[in-house]
Image (cartoon, grey):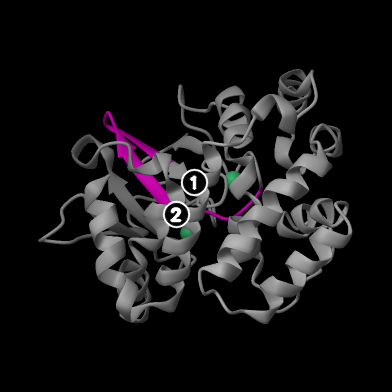
Amino acid sequence: MSVLRARLKRLEPSHEAVRFASLLITVRDELTEKVNPNKLVAQGFTEKVAFAIQRGLRPLLEDEVLECINYNYFSELLEQVFAKLVEKGSVDGELEQMLVNLKSDPGYSRLLLKSALGLVDNVVPNVEREVLAHIVLVPLQPILKIINKVNSRLDKPTWVKSCLTCGMNYILGSYRGGFRHMVCATCGHIARVDFFYCPTCGTTDPYSMRFERSMDEPYFQIELCDKCGAYYKMVNEDILGNASEDPLLLDFATIDLDNIANSLKHRSG
Ligand SMILES: [Zn+2]
Ligand SMILES: [Zn+2]
């Protein structure tokens, strides 16, 4: 994990998004220790998650799963997240307004969560949905771990288009034990996939995937689909350890690879 932490530090001065992510990671790590998962969701939560998965649904997008959350407690935790972000110098006026709204109505936390998951119209139009999701999901980290454990898809390749827990599109992936996986940058769900499979367009044509590896850091690889133009930032966990356990860190610590991927895209293959 230290390779990613060091990269994050190195990229901070030149990327505002990395500075924000770094702050969010600090806030998350402090909060996660204090969260009581038993207080956060009602009894029977795991069963409801399992039932949604059985029916082929994405559990984090299902009302019966979301209704298990104790929104008074969730709101309290989310307030702490926003308060820390505001206090530690994230001067975005939008965040301050969200904090004010949370304080006056705990039900606002439910609206923010649903907005972050794309289930209702965006209630904070000036904040990108991915960014909102990163913030709003901070208090739910222990819950996401439970959901993703029940929703494990590691035993055989799946044909996923987007995350099987939260529905977000893929940008990250990993190689582990010789297998290829897609990793959700938002909720951390991991799904094993075929070697030449592109989740965005569904192709399995070995000639449409380009694999670009860095000489200095052979544990990173950019995979670019020439059919649809999507790219994925892949990490070799057999070398780098459990990097996909912290997808937020993995995504922002490799923000420079996004630039490389985008320049490769314009160089036709
Ligand atoms: Zn997800
Ligand atoms: Zn594709």
Is 78 covered by the magenta stretch? no
User: What numbered label is drawn on residue 141?
Assistant: none
User: Disc 2 marks which residue?
Assistant: 26
- Residue at left offset 65%, top offset 29%: 37
* Front-most of residues 222 and 110: 110
At mark 2, the secondary structure is helix
Q: Amino acid at mark 1?
A: Glu
Label 2 Cα neighbours within 10 Å, binned few <14 / some 14-19 / many ≥20: few
Q: Is 128 on the left or on the right of 107, as rendered?
A: left
- Magenta residue span: 167-181
The answer to whether 55 is drawn above or below residue 241 in the figure is above
Label 1 Cα neighbours within 10 Å, binned few <14 / some 14-19 / many ≥20: few
- Residue at left offset 81%, top offset 69%: 123
Q: Determine whether label 1 and label 2 are within 8 Å by CB.
A: yes
The answer to whether 134 is drawn above or below residue 191 in the figure is below
- Residue at left offset 83%, top offset 43%: 72
At mark 1, the secondary structure is helix
Is 173 covered by the magenta stretch? yes
Q: Quadrant of the C terminus?
A: bottom left
Q: Is 177 on the left or on the right of 153, as rendered?
A: left
User: What numbered label is drawn on residue 30?
Assistant: 1
